[in-house]
Amino acid sequence: MDRSVIEAIGNTPLIRLNKASEATGCEILGKAEFMNPGQSVKDRAGLFIIRDAEKRGLLNPGGVIVEGTAGNTGIGLTLVAKALGYRTVIVIPETQSQEKKDALRLLGAELIEIPAVPYRNPNNYVKLSGRLAAQMARSEPEGAIWANQFDNVANRDGHVVTTAREIWEQTGGRIDGFVSAVGSGGTLAGVAAGLRGHSKDVKIALADPLGAALYSFYTDGELKSEGSSITEGIGQGRITANLEGFQPDFAYQIPDDEALPIIFDLVQEEGLCLGGSTGINIAGAIRLARDLGPGHTIVTVLCDYGTRYQSKLFNPEFLRGKGLPVPEWMEAKPEIDVPFEQVD
């Protein structure tokens, strides 16, 4: 029997992605991270960051955890914090989905919404959260810590010892490639390190949305971004501490109009309603499958539920406003013609 909700974090299943697999002749598998209790892969980061702070004596009972996040890491941190008796203060760009903000408030986080500005701006949500944590460490009776997911390598280390190990065991060691987008870098760099520790033959690929700079860095050696993406929680413009020393075997730049049809087809054809970052990941997995050729096994991450972005990703008006494809089924409003009074 699980002793608390945090015991339910991790050990998520692998799901075969049928359409992607059949299109490439490979076995493309998705790690179902949406099945974590906080409904995203970021539950793992939240757990390992908090446990690491406890081990180092930085968190006192009733203490405060401060973080700047696009949403999911804040949800993961708050879920773990509530189970262990801590508070969370979450700084989030106001441009993030209302569904994530609502989830944070529902879980009991103290939410601070600020304008979205680039990382170089001192009022960027990450930098502001760091200053706020330092201030609260002086004023809070039980102290406060900054989770600092981007440069706290407890994030990456958690994926080395859990996610990578699970993938290796679930595939029986028969894995040829792993693909992921980057937010903090913890998932991609951690899983890469863990899998490469088992086999040097596993190929690692970055799937980068437009507007991020890592594709340019890993292909041309320059942090340069172009375009934009509606995906949230991924896309990085610098080499975080979690990414230090990491080098992918392949790097792909994925536009939204390549990733979104994958997400929309998953709903209708495979019963999976997932977020935009998952579309970027699967598109990257398809590209890696084509580069490696048929007969390979490739794993990627199914990051979170699409319901967390319903007002954007599954909103025809929003999509049209961004010049993005809208599937026919999203426009249709089927009605059942049987009169209510005729239903037994």
Image (cartoon, grey):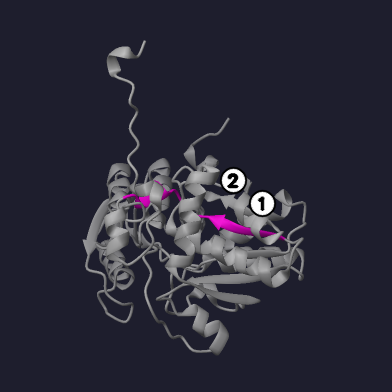
Find residue 12 and name its label.
2
Q: Quadrant of the C terminus?
A: top left
The type of residue carrying mark 2 is Thr
Q: Residue at coordinates 31% horizontally, 73% vertically from top-left?
A: 127
Q: CA distance from mark 2 to mark 1?
A: 8 Å
Residue 92 pos. (x, y %): 29, 61
Q: Nearer the viewer, residue 109 or 304?
A: 304
Sequence-first disc among 2 and 1: 2
Residue 77 pos. (x, y %): 41, 52
Q: Residue at coordinates 34% horizontally, 49% vertically from top-left?
A: 310
Find residue 166 and name its label.
1
Residue 10 pos. (x, y %): 57, 47
* Residue 170 seen in the current view: yes
Mark 2: secondary structure: loop
The type of residue carrying mark 1 is Glu
Splitting the image into 4 quarters, where does residue 82 fall?
top left
Splitting the image into 4 quarters, where does residue 67 fall?
bottom left
Q: Residue at coordinates 50% horizontally, 84% vertically from top-left?
A: 216
Q: Which residues are magenta?
A: 297-310
Q: Is residue 304 left or right of residue 197?
A: left
Find residue 260 and name its label.
none
Q: Nearer the viewer, residue 163 or 292?
A: 292
State the residue lying farthest toward the top.
Answer: 344
Q: Residues within 10 Å of mark 1 (few under 14, many from 20)?
A: many
Residue 156 pos. (x, y %): 55, 64
State the residue lying farthest toward the bottom.
Answer: 221
Q: Nearer the viewer, residue 252 or 301?
A: 252
Find out whether the residues at labels 2 and 1 contact each other: C-beta distance under 8 Å. yes
Q: Nearer the viewer, residue 64 or 340?
A: 340
Residue 301 painted magenta:
yes
